[in-house]
Amino acid sequence: MTTHRYATQTRSFTRSPVYGTHGMVATNQPLASEIGYRILREGGNAVDAAIAIAAALNVTEPCSTGIGGDCFLLYYNAETRQVAGLNGSGRCAKALTLERAMADCPNATSIPLGHVHSITVPGAVAGWVDAVKAWGTMSMQDILQPAIELAREGFPVAPVTSYLWETAAFQLTRWPHPEDLLIDGRAPRTGEIFRNPNLAASLEAIGLYGKAGFYEGPIANDIVAAVAAQGGLLSLEDLATHASSFVQPIKTTFDGIDVYEIPPNGQGITALLALNLLSQLPPEVLKSHQSPEYLHALIETLRLAFQDARWYVCDPEVEHVPVDELLGAAYAKARVELISPDKAMVDPKRGSPILSSDTVSFQVVDVYGNAVSMVNSNYAKFGSGLIPEGRGFSLQNRGSNFILEDGHPNALAPGKRPYHTIIPAMSLFADSQLLHSTFTVMGGFMQPQGHVQVLLNMLRFGMDPQEALDAPRFCIGAAEGENASVVSVEDTMPTATIDGLRAKGHTIQVLSNMERGLFGRGQIITRDPTSGVLCAGSDGRGDGVPMGW
């Protein structure tokens, strides 16, 4: 049950949370929030609104997301009180072997972000269509129409989006046909109107023909031609045979709350591993928010969690992932013994549980109490940056998360899905299975770190969604090739905390201004189990806003 309280004099004034009793959306773009809100007010459900938002975000923030990328979502059915999952990630080209990738990317441990072999089958469109067919109520034409109009008529570009667009424009200009996503060869400026009629036409084809409008016919031909022209191996068969996967979400229980994440090949298990480790620590360690002791515990548990995830998270259709063993209490008890309260770990190793940036995320709760937590992403800003001629969207570069090492569970293989960073999350009250919250913190390997930090802000310190998102965050290096010993923190972190972490042996990097984009952009909606009141927050590190009634 939510504890009602008066606002305090010390609360942050970045913005207030948004309250409602019927429906709520929280997205990274105000125009996308308005479209999702409109769909709900017109009678659509949470899934209808979520897909409309995903399409609108493709229009308003193509430097993060689009139909050239992937999606994952969790769906909460209020009637059955159950959570279902959809994995909308694409696969490696069937003609691309590990040997070929290693030959074309010499001396690399993974495929470079800008290499054509990093392009995997875009899974988002199939994910959208399959989600609507399974749980939605509206036609794809009606769901996509607001985004189509927005793309055709144009929109003023938001400030953070303009910055991200400008810093990533080079990804487009290194390939042919960048003009669809630029204005006179440059990124649009803040407040400048941007139109994308080619994307509008692509969305219209999807609305009319569903998956066939994207994975077959003219758009598919143009995708394959664009990739082939750069030496890539993606084929029409790769596109035509792509399919989403309906999956059983994985969960753990923390403070009487069941926390749900998408299973591998998504990295959501990282957050659950960290929560399991935190539950094994002495209670007093987690009592003082933003203290050196508190953050040290979070940093060390996440380091251990990432060591396991970077080895074990892979495509479960190709390799076995020991999820039950990794999330078992015995494994957490063994791993937590590696954590010292006074000293940072040096080069922690993965365990053995068995014997022998750039992304957009958004939340929706509808009038029926159903909820969607969804993430849609190109991966690194525009992804590969390669635009199929005249189609208005760029292709992702998720293949960069494969490991170029024979025998590694996440090694590249034909038709395989890579380790995936994008992860939606939900939490339910363990005793009743009523919705507690739906949340995300987008941004590469920051995502599970953000999940743990904002969830503890709410559960242990009673913060509302906006306060939980406004609080300073940290980020440890977890991507292939990153320095895992460096801990980045926001400049709003207390100086005494930073000094205390350094005293424990942590290498601290303080980031400010737009550098704080490293810490992700989150969206949260909570629901009071007694009154049904919805409360939403949208990260001040982005352009977004919640809307509800």
Image (cartoon, helix red, strand yellow):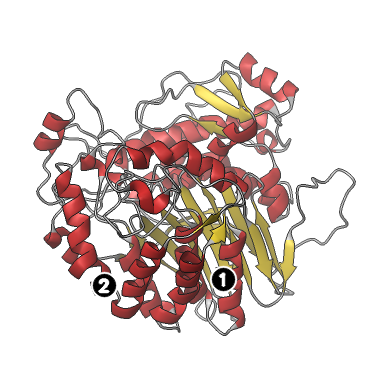
Query: Dividing the picture into quarters, in which one does residue 42 lie?
Result: bottom right
Q: Is 250 situated left or right of 289 in this image?
A: left
For badge 2, the amino acid type reads: Gly
Q: Any mark on residue 35, and which?
A: 1
Q: Where does residue 264 sit, x and y in percent of width and height?
A: 34, 51
544 or 313: nearer the viewer:
544
Q: Is residue 264 above or below residue 151?
A: above
Which residue is disc 2 drawn over?
213
Give the secondary structure at mark 2: helix
Q: Quick one: which residue is furthest to the front in this view?
A: 184
For badge 1, the amino acid type reads: Ile
User: Where, quadrant-wise, is the N terminus in this rendering?
Assistant: bottom right
Q: Is 525 situated left or right of 90 in this image?
A: right
Q: Which residue is drawn at 40% across and 57% down?
A: 66
417 or 207: nearer the viewer:
207
The reply to whether residue 248 is in sight is no
The reply to whether residue 74 is in sight is yes
